[in-house]
Image: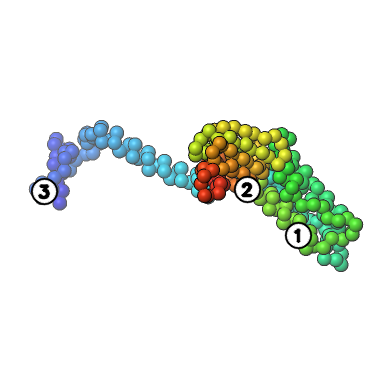
């Protein structure tokens, strides 16, 4: 059992494992406090702050999801408005369908809202939207069947879901070839072509669908398509095949 030794009726600061021989009474207020090693305090204090900080950081991030990129959020808003409009689209009484004019009006508004945030200069992406957006229904008939409408609305949802994942309207594309110093040409479906010599980096490339060509004397040319909307990445790696090789030209790896 520990025994506290007394100096001038006050407890000493050291503690030993001994059997007590004498027990004295003392007044705590009259006794000096124990000596404390200041180096120990300096060591303990940061640890105390560390344990307090961790729970605070954990709590602030608890249950929070990453913010949607500004570009993608714009199309997510269009998608939300579209779903609301579809929900409130009136059906024709006694028919399993909708008024064709109402359907086309909803498609037109959604298409305009989808194109609105895309820069006018981004012809590849605007062309992609024009191509993927469903055509209007035939208004020769007042009623269009629900199945036909659902097919068009599904195409709209698929398009908006892809656009809502975009983090920017442009990207910087790094093109690497082995061997290097090959000619690289990026040709959009609509817009101006871009060309460079590898290995190189193309800046501010608009998102969209492109054809690309790689040529180098003594090597087989590479001709492929690439989609900067459906696929994410920023690096194009290409392994060129010599003209004498039995293998055909290989497509590049986009990552």
Query: What SS does tag 2 mark?
Result: loop
Image quadrant in which you'd find residue 187 = top right
Neighbour tally class for label 3: few under 14, some 14-19, many 20 plus, Cα within 10 Å: few
Question: What whole-number distance in Å separates the C-alpha atoms at marks 2 and 3?
Answer: 78 Å
Q: Nearer the viewer, residue 125 or 223?
A: 223
Drawn side of residue 98 relative to residue 130, left or right: right
- Residue 2 in percent (x, y) is at 15, 48
| Distance (Cα) linking label 2 and label 1 | 23 Å
| Residue position marked by numbered label 1 in the rendering | 150
Residue nearer the viewer, 211 or 167: 211
Residue at the extreme bottom of the image, as rendered = 94
User: Residue 18 has which mark?
Assistant: 3
Q: Earlier in the sequence, mark 2 or mark 3?
A: 3
- Circles 2 and 1 in contact, beta carbons < 8 Å: no
Mark 2 surroundings within 10 Å by alpha-carbon count, few (fewer than 14), some (14 through 19), many (20 or more): some
CB within 8 Å, label 1 to label 3: no
Please provide percent x and percent y for residue 38: 25, 32
Question: Residue at 51% of width from left, 46% of height from top?
Answer: 245
How many numbered marks, from 0 up? 3
Q: Is residue 69 visible?
A: no
Of the numbered discs 1 and 3, the one sitting upstream in the chain is 3
Q: Report the mark closest to the observer, 1 or 3.
A: 1
Q: Badge 2 is on which residue?
A: 230
**Residue at 70% across, 41% down:** 189
Q: Is residue 251 visible?
A: yes
Mark-to-mark CA distance, 1 and 3: 89 Å
Mark 2 or mark 1, which is nearer to you? 2
Query: SS for tag 1?
Result: helix
Q: Vertically, is 99 above or below 174?
A: below
- Mark 2 or mark 1, earlier in chain: 1
């Amino acid at each position: 059992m520990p025994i506290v030794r007394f100096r001038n009726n006050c407890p000493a600061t050291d503690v030993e494992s001994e059997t007590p021989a004498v027990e004295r009474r003392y007044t705590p207020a009259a006794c000096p406090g124990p000596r404390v090693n200041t180096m120990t305090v300096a060591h303990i204090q940061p640890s105390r702050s560390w344990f307090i900080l961790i729970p605070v950081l954990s709590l602030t991030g608890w249950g929070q999801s990453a913010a949607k990129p500004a570009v993608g959020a714009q199309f997510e808003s269009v998608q939300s408005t579209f779903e609301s409009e579809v929900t409130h689209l009136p059906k024709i009484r006694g028919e399993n369908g909708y008024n064709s004019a109402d359907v086309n009006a909803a498609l037109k508004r959604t298409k305009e809202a989808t194109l609105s945030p895309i820069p006018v200069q981004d012809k590849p992406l605007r062309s992609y939207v024009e191509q993927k957006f469903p055509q209007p229904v035939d208004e020769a008939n007042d009623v269009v069947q629900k199945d036909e409408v659902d097919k068009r609305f599904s195409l709209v949802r698929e398009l908006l879901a892809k656009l809502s994942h975009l983090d920017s309207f442009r990207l910087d594309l790094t093109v690497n070839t082995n061997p290097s110093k090959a000619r690289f040409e990026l040709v959009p479906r609509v817009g101006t072509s871009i060309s460079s010599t590898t290995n190189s980096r193309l800046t501010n490339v608009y998102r969209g669908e492109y054809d690309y060509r790689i040529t180098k004397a003594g090597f087989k040319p590479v001709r492929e398509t690439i989609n900067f909307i459906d696929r994410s990445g920023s690096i194009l790696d290409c392994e060129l095949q010599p003209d004498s090789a039995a293998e055909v030209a290989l497509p590049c790896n986009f990552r």
